[in-house]
Amino acid sequence: MANAVELTAPNGVKYSQPTGLFINNNFVPAQSGQTLETISPSDEKVITNVACANADDIDVAVEAARAALKSLEWKGISTSARGLLLFRLADLVERDRAILATIDAWDVGKPYTVAFEEDLGEVIQVFRYYAGFADKQFGQTIDTTPEKFAYTRHEPIGVCGQIIPWNYPVMMAAWKLGPALACGNTVVLKAAEQTPLSVLYLASLIKEAGFPAGVVNIVNGLGRVAGAAMTGHLGIDKIAFTGSTVAGREIMKASAINLKSITLETGGKSPLIVFDDAELDQAIKWTHVGIMSNMGQVCTSTSRVYVQESVYSKFVDGLKDYVQTATVIGDPFAEKTSHGPQVSKIQFDKILKYIEIGKSEGATLVAGGKRHGEKGFFIEPTIFSDSNDSMTIAREEVFGPFVVISPFKTEEEAVTRANDTQYGLGAAVFTQNIAKAHRVSAEIEAGMVWINSSNDSHYGIPFGGYKQSGIGRELGSYALSAYSQVKAVHVNLGVRL
C-alpha cells in the first residue's frame, strides 16, 4: 500500500499502517509534505509519522466529497444498498478487531482488553445499528384539504465535516460516520492530531467495504489549521465536533460563515449524588467507573461527587480502598492492566498542575496525586475530599483520573450545587427511593442522568448535553435528524386562479 508503513506493535501484532490523507479512496501525502509525529504515551517513543493536512488539502477533500454527493454511485444507489455497505464495514471491523484494539492501546494508551471488548465492540454495533436505519428514513403524507396533496422527504444535508477527539478515536469516528452515511451524506473527517492511527486504518476498511470514492475522506492535521479550514469552508454544509467547550465556541463562530448545521458535544464537569439511602458499595464501585474509566479521559466523567453527610466519611474511606484495590496501573498490553497512561505530555502536565492547585486551595488529598513510574505519562488515580464549590478543582474540567468529593445535607442543596456549573453533559444519582430518584433526575440540568450507575451509555440512547456542554444529540435515532433535512412538497390538486 502506498503511503503506509509496516509496523510491529508491542504485543507482537504486525500490520500495515496507512500514513497518508485518505481522499477519494486513496492514501495521499499532504501537498506541503508536512507530517505529524504520533507518540506512544506508554514509553514516550515515536510510533510513526502521518501526513499533516493544511487548507489546500481540505479543499481537495471537500471537492471529492461534493463530487461523490452528486455521483450516481452514491446518490443513485438504493437505501438498502447504503445499509449493506455499513453492514460490510461492521463485518470488516469485526474481522480486524484485534488490530484496531492494538492500535488504540499503542497510540492512545488505553488497556488493550478495554479497547478490544468495549471500544471495538461498540464500533461494530454502531455501524450495524445505523445500517439498519438506512432504508427506514422516510417522510409523511400530510392531509390538509381535498385540493392539496402534501408530503415530506428526508434528504441528506450534504457534505459533513466531522472533527473527532483523541480519547476514543475509532469509536468516535463510528458515532459520527454511522448516522451521516445512513442518511446519504458524504464526509470529510479529521482525526485528532494526537491519535490518528486507528482512524486511518478504519479508512482502509471503508474502501474495502465498497464505499464509492469520495464518500468518506479522512484527514490528519492540527486543529488550528486543518480544523479551522473545515469549519470555515463554504463547501461544507454541516460540522459535527466533539472536544472542549473553548474549541466548540470557536467552531460555532466559524460555522456561521454559511450557517452550517452544527452538532457540538463539548466539555463537562458532571455531578454524582449519593444519598444516605443508597447501596453504598454500589455507589462506590460506580463512582470508580464514572471517573477512572479511560484514565478519566471521558467527557461525561462524573468528577464532582456529592455525598450526604451521614455517610460521607464511610464513602470517602470506601472509595479510597476500592480504587487502590481495583486499579492496576501499567503496560496497556498486560492482561491485568486497568489503568494506562494519559494520552500526552500536555494532558499529563495539566493534570499534575490541577493536583497542585487542589492542594493549595485546601482540599484534602485522599489518594494518588503523583505520577506512576519514571517513563510514560502515568498518573495515579487521584481523590480529593473536603472540597467546596468555589475551588478551581471543583469547577474546571480536568479530564483525568481526578475526583473531588464534598458533603451535603439536603436534597435541595444537592440539586442546587449539582446545577451550579456552566456544563450540563451528564449526572448520576444514587438512592433506593425511586420517587426521589426520578424527582432529582428531573431537576438536574444535564442531557443524560444515570440512576444507580454512571457512564454506562448505549449506542441506542441519545448522547448530548445542556448549557455549554453542547448542541444536538448523537447516537440513537435522534442522531439521524442531525444528518437529514426535511423538504415539504405541495401538490395542487384543484385550486385554480
Image: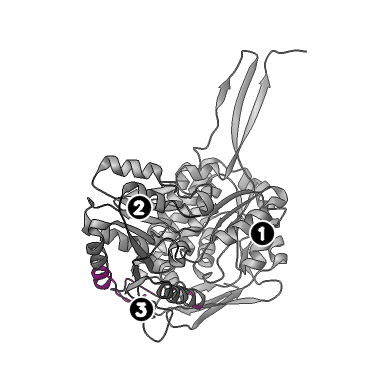
Assign a secondary structure to mark 3: loop
Q: Is residue 486 above or below residue 216?
A: above
- Check disc 1 and report the residue beneath it: 230
Can residue 177 be seen by looking at this rendering?
Answer: no
Q: Quadrant of the C terminus?
A: top right
Determine the secondary structure under disc 1.
Answer: helix
> Looking at the image, is mark 2 or mark 1 earlier in the sequence?
1
Q: Which residue is mark 2?
A: 428
> Which residue was labeled with disc 3?
331
Between label 2 and label 3, give the one nearer the viewer.
2
Vertical arrangement, residue 330 with respect to residue 181, above or below: below
Whichever of callouts 2 and 3 sits on the residue coming sooner in the sequence is 3
Q: Position of residue 482 (x, y in %)?
A: 55, 45
Q: Quadrant of residue 375?
A: bottom left
Q: Which residues are magenta?
A: 320-345
Within 10 Å of disc 2 (Cα), the crowding (few <14, some 14-19, many 20+) is many
Horizontal side, residue 273 vs residue 191: left or right: left
Farthest right residue? 497
Residue 343 in magenta?
Answer: yes
Q: CA distance from mark 2 to mark 3?
A: 31 Å
Q: Residue 42: horizontal and vertical position, in percent?
A: 42, 79
Of 468 and 254, which appears nearest the observer? 468
236 on left or right of 263? right
